[in-house]
Amino acid sequence: MNVGVSKMSTCPTDVAPTKGRIIEDTAIIIPAHNEEAVIKNVIIDVQRLFKYVVAVSDGSTDATCTEAKSAKAIVIDHQPFGLGQGGALQTGIEYALGLPVDYFVTFDADGQHQVEDVIKMRDEIKKTKVDIVMGSRFLGEEPRNMTRAKRVMLKAAVIFSNITSGIKLTDAHNGLRIFNRHVAQSINLEEPGYQHASEITEKIKKNGYSYKEIPVKIIYTDYSKSKGQSIFNVVNLGTDIIMGKIVK
Amino acid sequence: MIVAQIVFIGAAIGLMVLFLLSGGSRTSAMKKIAAFLLVAIAIVFIIRPAFADDVAQMVGIGRGSDLVLYGLVFVVVLQIINNSVAKKKQQKREAKIVRQVSLLRKELEELREDQENTN
């Protein structure tokens, strides 16, 4: 299996490429649906610091796969149809379990997440030995360019998630997480779409994973805002979670 | 009358919970029994419409037509939930298939690449 590693980033960030060792004990899993515009740069940015990047194209109808392959990521393509972000993550996790890694990171494809935050989270999980470390945009610096409607929606989602799962988090729907092999082997995500965020929270409680939240930076661009959850879809998400509780 | 209403509402909810929790052949058998009972009750009400009124007054609903309506609502809601359960199970099966196919294709791709690199 050939995995190319780009040492120089070509993406327009203001962070200089890090010199030094490339991290080989962590797999970065990037679920992507129709992200041809940004996926290559996102992967190249991650590859500055991490050897194993697993991109899962989830039923994409554009050039997401081609772009991801051109960045020399490990690319898995869900065809003939996608399974949603949760399904793509589970596929990425199952593949990554075959790699010689100790940690698994879920990382969004739209460029919102910062690779440097993954380093911080990796340091945290190694230091505290918890099973899962999750990023929170509400613990540290205020997210840049977040609309008021989005802020209200996310806060409401957090309250709802905390009530339904019994786990107290400040940012349950943050896609940036790192977990160990035990979690990767047992988490078994089954919910479609964005419900996986709530499913992960429920699995934390059900499987007794130890967890921690640390502040991370989320940068909203016009592109990432266009790809985010609509407020109307939040209604679908909420009812699906309630139905999921009634109908197991 | 209120007590009778509470008892029947409780029984309806209890039946629904039992229906949802049971699986496999038990659920299938329960559905068949329920369908048979519904048809039998419908036949009785058609033959003796006054009987529907008697039952309705016994449970505190009032009119036989209201009793039939509430029964219909109950059945429709149960069917919606049943369809949701079936759809969810179907989605999980589909997801497993798509995932296995995708991972196998990836494995094949890697084997081909290894072969090309060796040659």
Image (cartoon, rainbow, N blue to C red):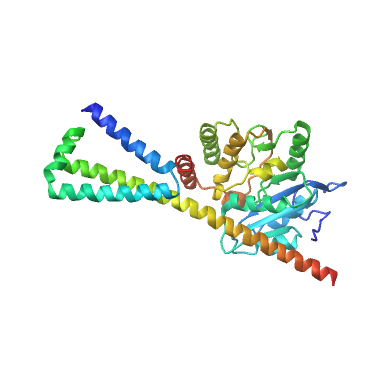
Residue A67, how many percent across, how many down?
Answer: 70, 62
B48 displayed left or right of A36: left
Q: Residue furthest bottom?
A: B119
What residue is at 75 percent from the left and 34 percent from the top? A124
Residue situated in front as seen by the camera: B119 or B48: B48
Q: Quadrant of the C terminus of chain B?
A: bottom right
In percent of width and height, residue A40 lies at 71, 58
Q: Does residue A42 appear in the picture of this structure?
A: no
- Image-based side of A186 in relation to B61, left or right: right
Residue A129 can be seen in this image = yes
Most extreme residue toward the right, as rendered?
A20
Q: Position of residue B58 (x, y in %)?
A: 18, 33
Q: Is residue B35 left or right of residue A66?
A: left
Provide residue A245's location: percent of width, then percent of height.
48, 39
Instruction: Out of A127 and A149, give the one closest to the viewer.
Output: A127
Residue shown at the point (33%, 51%) measured from the top left? B32
Tell me: residue A234, above or below residue B119: above
Compared to residue B16, the image places residue A226 above or below, namely below
The quarter of the rendered structure image containing the N terminus of chain B is top left
| Closer to the camera in the image, A37 or A161 | A161
Q: In the depicted view, which residue is nearer to us: A23 or B58?
A: B58
Report the number of discs: 0
